[in-house]
Amino acid sequence: MSKNLVIVESPAKARTIEGYLGKDYEVKSSFGHIRDLPKKGLNIDIEHSFEPTYEVSTDKKKVVAELRKAAAGKEVWLASDEDREGEAIAWHLTQALKLDPAKTKRIVFHEITKPAIERAIENPRIIDINLVDAQQARRVLDRLVGYELSPVLWKKVKTGLSAGRVQSVSVRLIVEREREIRKFEAEASYKVTGVFLADKQDLPAELTTKFKDKTLARNFLEACTDEVFTVSSVAKKPGTRSPGPSFTTSSLQQEAARRLGFSVKQTMTLAQRLYEAGKITYMRTDSTNVSLLALQAAEKYIKKTFGDNYHKQRQFQTKSAGAQEAHEAIRPTNFDTLSAGEDAGQEKLYKLIWQRTVASQMSDAKIDRTEIAINLSKRPEVFMAKGEVLVFDGYFKVYGGGKDDVIVPDVKQGQQLPAKEIAATETFSRPPARYSEAALVKKLEELGIGRPSTYAPTISTIQSRGYVLKTDLEGKERTIQSLTLKAGKIGEASRTEITGADKNKLIPTDIAEVTTDFLVKYFGEILDYDFTAKVEGDFDNVADGKQQWQAMIQDFYKGFHPLVVKSEDVSREDAQQARTLGQDPASGKPIIARYGRYGTMLQKGEATDDDKPDFAPLPKDTSLETVTLEQALEMFKLPRIVGATTDGKEIKANIGRFGPYIQVDKLFVSIKPLDPLKITLEEAQKLYQEKLDKEAAKHIQTFKGGIQVLNGMYGPYITDGKKNARIPKETDPAKITEAEAKKMLAEAPAKGKRNFRQRKGSRQ
């Protein structure tokens, strides 16, 4: 019988570690957090030093009972992750299992390998209460903000909204970027490129000056018909490109998004699996440090595989001022393992981590750069031709790689170059880029907001709460003008291009804008970027033992709570940022764009009028900020009578909560993506008939008491509206009798139970 119990966070981690320890050690999992603040209520005693009340989660009571039983009479080793959250889990385990935190052995390791586990067992410590307090401070502060701020939003803006310190700041970043893009007006200019002949070889070059308009560009091309082009200088200089450091959590998320198309959440899930399998070091870190043993292992691999000249040892300085999550960057645990992972996603991510780490210890790539300046005889502008040749690939051998060589012909200073062709092409300035998930992580990191463990859950939360959509943007068509000088003549042409198209970008919803405006106006300090970063610094001070956590929370709360009290006086109309667009010409009533119970809407008239206001939805592709009076007036023409069905029933078109639709009697038919103001009678009749055909195909049989045999998404089934019963494959649904249908329903589980069991089983 084993004398020791090792408790880790996940079953996968437990299995890996158990393989490295002998029979004297039993390894069990806590399945993550076992205690937390109860979901209902504040559970923080504000009057008594913000003392939190924790409870064992309902789904963890069985786990705790099993761990208590397993720990009886044994030496307990707490082996949760090495960051603050892991330290807090270890402390909560001592409380739940009635262990003394000052005596219970705590072990940490940033990779799950046999040597690392053995070293940890040889060097146990006790729980670091400063790290626990830092995590406790984060949990308490975030609960205070959420508990007090969310109800304010429910009363003043919309029921069901949530607010959070990092969450709301993240939404603010996305809202402000979207507004920058809306305000942006693209400025046109003309870029001039030329192709010159150097001993019968083409030499492409670009003018270092841009022209503001077409007239100036044409004037330049006209002048070029009488110009002599001469090489004024040839500069050749060697250059180098150096590899980046091994990954931190943030840089891994960004690079996995850029190279592999992974979401932040997907990257962290895959990295977690690789870590638990012992293939990579701990994946929540803001350190770029690599251990001496790993540096030596990388050196051995590089010299053996590529040669001595490909190796260059580097130790990168960690940029993050508060780097505290773990003490090493994300790297492979064994450099000789070239491929790892249980699925394609894990394999791709492992390869990326392996390549980045190995490359960070390799030589610089060496490049020869050539710059050729070409002067005009009568004008001051200068053409510049650039070439680049890779001389030594260095770290490009495994990661990155340069663009194809751009070789320029040999020319000499003073050499005249005939112009083969000179073109002036219209270009437009670009608006700021919308955030992708990875770009948002980078921005939060730059601002000092959040930590490696918070990025992925924050980004998931702002999407699941309806503040942000991750979507593809179609873009708009734009005409590009160009002028070309060839054989002494200037030709003119135009072409179209799509501008603004983008993939997987974060777009704020209308409720995000309304909520952000409200919070910035009445809780500006909480949403201030510098203030939010300062709070992160306070957590770091608590973790370092420089600040007492209750004092830190008290300092925050005395500024925060009065804002909550003051917000009670804010009117709902003010909070919802209602915007008056103008007056309805027919009635003289105001047209207002505002946020209502079910989202954005238009309102004609005031609630205080004798007549009740009329309501209409916002037009497609508009927002509360952008909708115009003209667009709004069109929407009040809905519902629109389109015409009649072939059997004389009226067809009405309108927009509802779920988008545009037509209605015939009590039958509703979605018409997405058609416009209810423009849909033709022919289109409406076709969609109506298709819906009738679909409904007819859905119904197989109908019995008394509302029992029906229907075709569903997953095959035929029986329903009485309260319970559903699957029909066996070998049974013909058209031949089922009423008695058989009743029997199947009686034997079927209550609605939802079967699905719950299936979902629960799929997670094991």
Image (cartoon, helix red, strand yellow):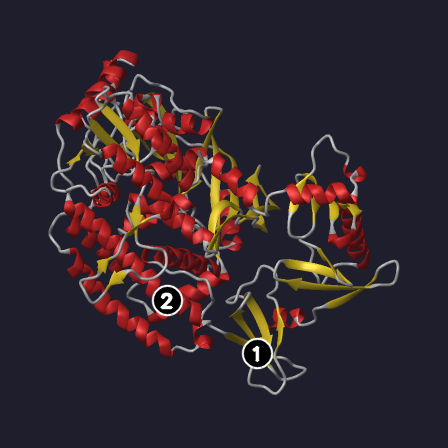
Mark-to-mark CA distance, 1 and 2? 27 Å
Q: How many labels does the image show?
A: 2
- Against 598, residue 440 (above or below) is above
Q: Nearer the viewer, residue 509 or 315?
A: 509
Residue that carries the numbered disc 2 in the rendered image: 519
Earlier sequence position, callout 1 versus callout 2: 2
In the rendered image, which quarter is residue 99 located in? top left
Residue that carries the numbered disc 1 in the rendered image: 582
Q: Where is residue 695 in the image (x, y as percent from the top left)?
A: 76, 49
Q: Residues within 10 Å of mark 1 (few under 14, many from 20)?
A: some
Q: What element carries label 2?
A: helix
Q: Position of residue 539 (x, y in %)?
A: 20, 52
Which residue does the image show at 11% across and 49% down from the upper left? 545
- Against 754, residue 169 (above or below) is below
Name the residue type under label 2: Leu
Q: In which quarter of the image is the C terminus?
A: top left
Q: Where is residue 195 in the image (x, y as percent from the top left)?
A: 49, 34
Q: Is mark 1 on a helix, strand or loop?
A: strand
In this view, which residue lies farthest toward the right? 647
Q: In which quarter of the image is the N terminus?
A: top left
- Against 517, residue 749 (above or below) is above
Which residue does the image show at 76% across and 43% down from the upper left? 739
Name the residue type under label 1: Gly
Q: Would you say 172 lies left or right of 95 here? A: right
In the rendered image, which quarter is residue 410 located in? top left
Q: Nearer the viewer, mark 1 or mark 2?
A: 2
Q: Residues within 10 Å of mark 2 (few under 14, many from 20)?
A: many
* Residue 238 seen in the figure: no
* Residue 503 seen in the figure: yes
Q: Would you say 486 lies left or right of 637 here? A: left
- Against 656, residue 330 (above or below) is above
